Image (cartoon, rainbow, N blue to C red):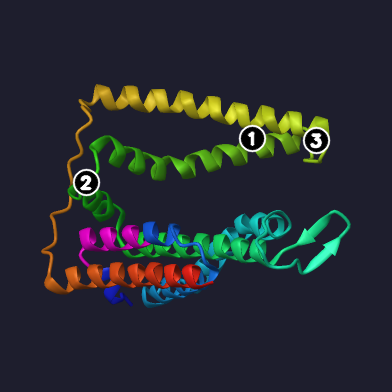
Amino acid sequence: MRGWLHAWEPRCKVAALLGAAGGVAFLHHWYAALLAFALAALLAGVSRLSLRFVVAYLSILTLAAIPFVLILPWTLRDGRPAWVEWGPLTFHPYGLETGLAVGLRLAAIGLLALTLFGTTPWSELLAALHRLGLPAALVWIVALARQYAELLGREFQRLRAALRVRGFRPRPTWHGYRHLGYACGALLVHGAERAERVAAAMRCRGFQGRFIALTPPRPCRLRDLLACVLLWLIVLCLALWERQILEGG
């Protein structure tokens, strides 16, 4: 069943969610980042996306945030005493809070992007980006990146299968790192060659860099604009509340 986010006018939706993601990126305190994550999770839930897909996506973001949570508590400090002292290493609450803030911001921005991509057809999303003033070259980069990411993934799987057939197993040794470097280099070379062929084919078909939207624009209703402004105001309130916390703490 389609939710109200699917019916949101694409230009207002893109402006609202991308603007909210940009505002979340500037939050520093983990309290504000936690509330931003809760807001993003609420939007993802309202969008009625697949729960399994959302959980898998969050797992990937969690893995990306783990290095910050593990390293920053041992490297960043403020005036508060350390929680743990182990020889030359000290575990500081400020570093832990900073690591949590980074992880929560990453998860919140990822959920906002997931909500945008999951509730907007790809053709409407590209058309909305172009109508909002994004240069045609950048719109084409976004379109081609999405189209050929899966192709590069299949190419990587073929390279991986070829290595396994030849008896290679990835291990943390100089031999393993060298062959993985060869495989990544071959993937980049194949990708560059394919990009040149695609560019030549597009020029042969008269491509001149202009982006022509194939979907007609939807009418922008008052409630679409109000929803966009409301989301911006919520993120702005989070930023102002965070500023009060930082000034008072």
Lower position in the chain sequence, tag 2 or tag 1: 2
Magenta part of the chain: 8-20
Question: Disc 3 marks which amino acid?
Answer: Gly
- Position above or below: 71 against 147: below
Residue under numbered circle 3 = 167
The secondary element bearing badge 3 is classed as loop
Residue under numbered circle 1 = 159
The secondary element bearing badge 2 is classed as helix
Image point 67% across, 54% down: which residue? 67
Left or right: 97, with 125 as reference point? right
| Front-lying residue, 65 or 196 | 65
**Magenta segment: does it hold 29?**
no
Residue 100: which disc? Answer: none
Q: Nearer the viewer, mark 2 or mark 1?
A: 2
Image point 57% across, 62% down: which residue? 103
Question: Disc 1 marks which amino acid?
Answer: Leu
Question: Disc 2 marks which amino acid?
Answer: His
